[in-house]
Image (cartoon, rainbow, N blue to C red):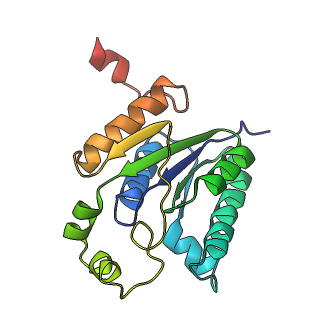
Amino acid sequence: MNDPGTVLWFTGLSGSGKSTLSRLIENELRDRDLNVEVLDGDEVRENLSKGLGFSKEDRDTNIRRIGYVARLLSRNGTITITAAISPYAEVRNQCRAMCGDFVEIHTDCSIEELTRRDVKGLYAKALSGEIKNFTGISDPYEAPESPEIRVNSETQTAEESLEVILKWLEENGTIPAKEGAEEAAA
């Protein structure tokens, strides 16, 4: 029987760095020979939740599906990384209860900064009313009040955020310390 895995649940507004950080974490964990899978919100929406819209009910269904797959993977010893906006606290909490070992990671960033760096212009379109039900603009985003980890992609580089996340995961026994780290610290 495999030891249960952990779910690393990234949440944050569109463009805040969830996918970037999830891929960086994935690479680091694979380098440590850990079993890891990423459930990216865009990929899940395309392959598992095709046909769902962006109503609250459809968003909740999409997030519950991600939580369900994360639970299946984690109970079989896989560290499962999710990277989806997951805007509503109630559904994130349902996923937390479903998954067991659950680490919520909030990628924080201001709307102003997200708008400034948005190459697709989605924030500008949402702010002008061209895009309806856009999370953080015309649809709510309920930021986590007490995530296990909070990083800020406006004030930290991706590498700095990665270090914050890895340090927390190591200090809390979620992942083993990187080999050679003990000698380097001495």
Location of residue 74 in the rendering, given as x and y in whole percent from the top left corner: 68, 47
Is residue 99 toward the left or the right of residue 151 in the image?
A: right
| Quarter of the view holding residue 65 | bottom right
Residue toward you, 63 or 161: 63
Residue depicted at x 52% and y 67%: 41
Is residue 34 toward the left or the right of residue 122 in the image?
A: right
Location of residue 28 in the rendering, given as x and y in whole percent from the top left corner: 41, 44
Residue depicted at x 41% and y 36%: 166
Is residue 21 toward the left or the right of residue 143 in the image?
A: left
Residue toward you, 115 or 27: 115
Whether residue 44 appears in this view of the structure is yes
Residue toward you, 66 or 118: 118
Residue depicted at x 62% and y 83%: 50
The relative height of residue 135 versus residue 109 in the rendered view (above or below) is below
The relative height of residue 86 versus residue 166 in the rendered view (above or below) is below
Whether residue 48 appears in this view of the structure is no
Residue toward you, 1 or 86: 86
The relative height of residue 151 versus residue 58 in the rendered view (above or below) is above
